[in-house]
Amino acid sequence: MFTLYPFGYGQGRVIDRTLLGRHRTGLTRSTARTTDGFDLDIMPDDHIGRHLRFTGQFDRTIPDVLVSLSRDGDHILDVGANIGYVACMMLRHIANARLAAVEPRPDCFALLAGNLKRLSSGAIAVNAAVSDHDGTGLLEMAAANSGASRLIGASADENELRSQRLSVELLTGKSLLTRIGFPRIDLVKIDVEGHEHAVLRTLLSSFGNSKPRAIVFEHHARFAGSERALYDLLISSGYELLGIRKALRAWRLVPVVSADTGPFFCDYVARLR
């Protein structure tokens, strides 16, 4: 519907700020054609699915940033892949890429596995969450926006399980890398709704001396105070931190000067020095 919209990164704002944001089909599953020419199975009444249904894309900035940081033949890890839009964009635009996508939510994972298979028979889907220990955790399922689902506990108490909460498998970075079997990881995307520090800590301790070239992650809090540990972890691991400044027609990377003064964004790139 919005393929001719004049701003390359602004279609989602039209969806969120109009009656289209409340439109419901009553369907649990359908297929959307993306602006990049491939089909995705979606949940059409979910936040992400609605964007894809009306515009053919979702937050185009993040996949574009990832592709700009990529090289042919990259080994890619997508943690918090949802239904696989970003993962499939990377498979579509990065030649000879090998990709593993991790998603704990079962309904999203079912779509993710099928969407990856449509783009690449060698892509791997893992139904789990990444954390700082192996075991089980409690996932709070956001009803209208699957992308807002988040881990709320290190272990699942049966008395806490309700319709919107689910026990999920947790994997450390070491366990995840063993399961997918990649010889290295070159590029990482992380979208885990507040669990970024635990994910980065376990992954960086597992990569050893062969660190990814770049890590793209979402993080809504400032790095000062208790969040400074995340900033310090990345800097001490040999990365420089850049924020992703988004606009209607373009995006650019802006150096984060310090943990205390920022500037601060919602999405970041950690790039190996």
Image: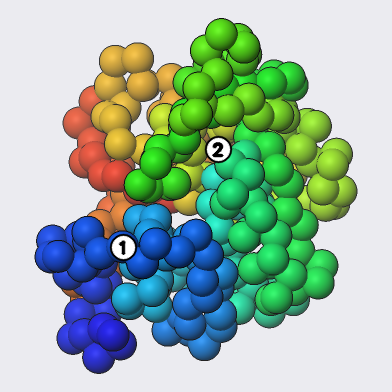
The residue lying toward the viewer, choosing from 148 and 253, is 148
Check disc 2 and report its element: helix, strand or loop.
Answer: loop
Relative to 37, say whether 196 is above or below.
above
Whether residue 178 is visible here, answered yes or no, is yes
**Residue 188 location (% of width, % of height):** 59, 51
Name which of mark 1 and mark 2 comes first in the sequence. 1
The part of the image, by quadrant, that contains residue 170 is top right
Q: Is residue 102 above or below residue 135?
A: below
Residue beneath disc 2: 238
Residue drawn 48% across and 82% down? 33
- Amino acid found under the numbered disc labelled 1: Arg
Question: What residue is rendered at 74% in x and 21% in y?
Answer: 134
Which residue, as the protein is rendered here, is positioned at the far left?
18
Q: Quadrant of residue 247?
A: bottom left
Residue at disc 1, secondary structure: loop
Q: Are marks 1 and 2 in contact (CB under 8 Å)?
A: no
| Image: 194 above or below 181 | above
Residue at 52% across, 75% down: 31
Is 222 situated above or below 246? above
Q: Which residue is mark 1?
A: 24
Horizontal arrangement in the rendering, residue 260 relative to residue 39 (left or right): left
Q: Residue at x 20, y 31 (%)?
A: 261
How far apart are labels 1 and 2 at the CA level?
46 Å
Closer to the camera in the image, 15 or 200: 15
